[in-house]
């Protein structure tokens, strides 16, 4: 026996024996959305690239907090993570986040777990502090 229930949003749920089957209806978009792409444009300003790098890091469940800045086309991403006990796991997380953030930003991203660097990164930091951090991370 098949029973049909109509839930909010037009989703139809049917039971066939003991199995539960979910069907999602087709939705026609209004004409004004016809040519709109869901792809986002690559970030163009240094602050947009820094924000994009932060968002990539924060999308990982191991990352608790992230801060980033860019200077001279070099993006620095500092993260605080859940405890990671194996050096191999930490290295793999660093490689993964650097790769994903670089792809989104369109420029190289250097990731660090250094708490001092994380604490120094702020929206109103001076160029001298940025240079100091780049030197500390041996990017310059």
Image (cartoon, helix red, strand yellow):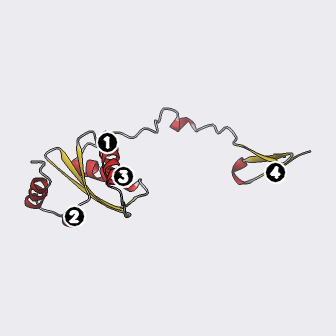
Element at label 2: loop
Q: Position of residue 19 (x, y in %)?
A: 80, 46
Q: CA distance from mark 1 to mark 3?
A: 15 Å
What distance separates the C-alpha of mark 2 from that of mark 1?
23 Å
Q: Residues within 10 Å of mark 4 (few under 14, many from 20)?
A: few
Tell us which disc is closer to us: 2 or 3.
Answer: 3
Q: Callout 1: few (<14), some (14-19), or many (20+) C-alpha neighbours within 10 Å?
A: some
Q: Assign a secondary structure to mark 1.
A: helix
Cβ–Cβ below 8 Å for labels 3 and 4? Answer: no
**On residue 122, which mark appears?**
2
The disc, 4 or 1, on the residue closer to the chain's N-terminal end is 4
Q: Residue furthest top?
A: 35
Q: Which residue is mark 1?
A: 99
Mark closest to the chain's N terminus, 2 or 3: 3
Mark 4 highlights which residue?
5
* Disc 4 to disc 1, C-alpha distance: 46 Å
Q: Using the image, determine if residue 136 lies above or below residue 4.
A: below
> Toward the viewer: 25 or 69?
69
In percent of width and height, residue 76 lies at 21, 52
Tell me how far mark 4 sits from mark 2, CA to CA: 53 Å
Residue at point 7%, 59% (across, down): 128
Q: Position of residue 43 (x, y in %)?
A: 29, 43
**Which mark is in front, 1 or 3?**
3
The residue where tag 3 is placed is 89
Name the spot of residue 30 as percent of width and height, x first: 58, 38
For the residue pair 96 and 21, the one nearer the viewer reads as 96
Label 2 close to label 3 by CB (< 8 Å)? no
Q: Nearer the viewer, mark 2 or mark 1?
A: 1
Q: Do tag 2 and tag 1 residues touch (Cβ < 8 Å)? A: no
Looking at marks 2 and 1 on the same chain, the residue that comes earlier in the sequence is marked by 1
């Amino acid at each position: 026996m098949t029973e049909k229930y109509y839930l909010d949003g037009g989703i139809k749920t049917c039971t066939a024996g003991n199995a539960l089957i979910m069907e999602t209806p087709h939705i026609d978009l209004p004409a004004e959305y016809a040519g709109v792409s869901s792809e986002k444009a690559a970030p163009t300003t240094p602050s947009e690239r820094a924000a994009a790098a932060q968002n990539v890091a924060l999308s990982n469940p191991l990352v608790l907090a992230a801060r980033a800045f860019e200077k001279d086309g070099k993006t620095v991403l500092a993260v605080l993570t859940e405890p990671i006990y194996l050096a191999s796991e930490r290295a793999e997380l660093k490689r993964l986040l650097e790769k994903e953030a670089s792809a989104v930003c369109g420029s190289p991203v250097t990731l660090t777990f250094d708490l001092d660097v994380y604490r120094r990164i702020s929206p109103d930091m001076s160029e001298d502090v940025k240079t100091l951090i780049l030197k500390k991370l041996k990017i310059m």
